[in-house]
Amino acid sequence: MKNANTLHIPALIPRPKNITFTGETAPSNVVVTEQTVPGLANEAYRLLVTPEKILLMAASPAGFARAKSTLEQLRYSYGNQIPCMEISDAPAKPYRSFHIDCARHFIPMEELKKMIAMAAVFKFNKFHWHFSDDQGWRIESRAFPLLHETGARRGGDHFGSYVSDHEEWHYYTRDEVKDLVTFCEDLGIEIVPEVDLPGHVCAILAAYPELSCHGNPVDVQTRAGIFQDILCPGKEETFAFLEELLSDLLELFPGDYFHIGGDEAPKGQWETCPHCRRRMEEEGLSDLWQLQGYFNNRVAAFLKAKGKTVIAWNEAARGGNLDPDIILQLWNDGKAPGSGEIHTTGMEHLKRGGRLIMSTMMNAYCDYPYAFISLKKTYGLSLIPYGMESLTADEENRVLGTECLLWTEYIRDWEKLERLAWPRFVSGAELSWCGGAPDGYSDFKRRLTDLYPAFAAHGIGAEKPAGWDPGPVESARQLLEFKKNFPKDVLDDFKKNQKSI
Ligand code: ACM
Ligand code: ZN
């Protein structure tokens, strides 16, 4: 939707819905006032710049947070000489998320807050916090203290070709978590906690091994990969444990959403487990994918009864029996890189009346080098699942938004973390707020380039514009560097375990 105004659109991201320039410039000492306007939708806002004052109008704290982020961006563009204008703006999509994995490598709280404050400038409203995985459980647990005493501790760091045998022991205390929740709330951001289940649980099993099918000791992993030890859905104790664990976590996380994982759960141990076999017979489940559906549905039912809206990764729907009320987050929708498999669970879930979050790996995984996933690719993230040409208005409403992700297997320093995340994360924020790319990639890049000082102002070392879409020489260099994370034995192991899911 090019219009006459496009060239004059200031460096604002996401691009606001309506901007009208009204002439003149506000003086540098102009007063800023806020006015509550009850008729506006939750995150909608209006912003008026006049020679007399700057007026922010919204109906809710979230609306005022969005208005303030627009004003902050106007200041990066214009300094203290902001042209007079009227903006009225509201998001197309309710779910605008970024994800950080604090399990593979623990991110100090101050760094996490810096990343979140940066995200607020771009109007993100969800922080998907991945704090539990094979390589660490990262939150102090009142219900099950061995989670932070044992599950947060591992015997080194052997991700990729990195070798450290120093013991690592890191977790966030409950007080730190409460402080982070308040910090996020003040910025209009909800934390979406994830407890990844039934796979990616070696850290939980290291603390409570009786919850696996075999009950044998399990280590907190120090390598990347997919691990065979997962929770046993045949044992009632598993669900009793999870209900107590989740109840305890719900006290820390007051938001609407809860993510229950569901990705990459190898089912070899379920196949031969008498508890799992009995469960399948009793529940009339035809295969192991349905057993996973049963597992995820049961955990979701518990959370739904507590008022939560539940999210799961797309594999949870493969048995065809996933509760359609569970929001499906797509990460390997369509053609899975490497395996040649085609996944259409997104389309099927949408057709069954379900809701989706779009975060396909080849667009949204910002831990990959720019050579692999350029800014142009992140900005190309589709709001339509694989297999569909277009959506009805009702289907479009059930695509709730996007998420950009940072997995941290190969991220040990925060300069790298910041450079990988920014500015690629910004793509998802704009696509969700605008419901697509409003004026195309080059206009997005123009605004992003003008807005570049925003990163330094927040102490964030973003990738420089020259690196956003690297050319062949730089790409070759980055890919060579990235490949060092995958020596042959690691790659073979990955492939073998991928097959066993
Ligand atoms: C995932 O990348 N396993 C969600
Ligand atoms: Zn079992």
Image: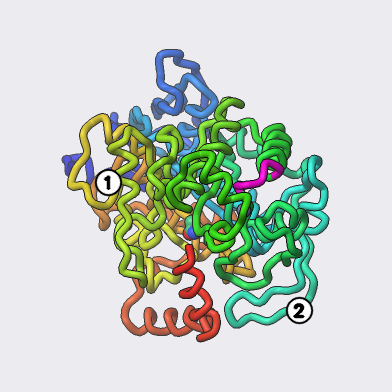
Q: CA distance from mark 1 to mark 2?
A: 45 Å
Q: For this view, does 210 lie left or right of residue 441? A: right
* Disc 1 target residue: 384
Q: Residue at x 44, y 58 (%)?
A: 423
Q: Is residue 121 visible?
A: yes
Q: Residue at x 63, y 80 (%)?
A: 162
Toward the viewer: 295 or 214? Answer: 214
Judge whether 498 appears above or below 75 on screen.
Answer: below
Q: Residues within 10 Å of mark 2 (few under 14, many from 20)?
A: few
Judge whether 398 appears above or below 460 on screen.
Answer: above
Q: Confirm whether the magenta stretch covers residue 24.
A: no
Q: Look at the image and give the residue range highlighted in magenta.
A: 233-237
Toward the viewer: 159 or 13? Answer: 159
The amino acid on which the numbered mark 1 sits, given as a three-letter code, is: Ile
- Magenta stretch, overall SS: loop
The amino acid on which the numbered mark 2 sits, given as a three-letter code, is: Asp
Toward the viewer: 475 or 276? Answer: 276
Judge whether 395 appears above or below 293 on screen.
Answer: above
Disc 1 secondary structure class: loop
* Disc 2 target residue: 165
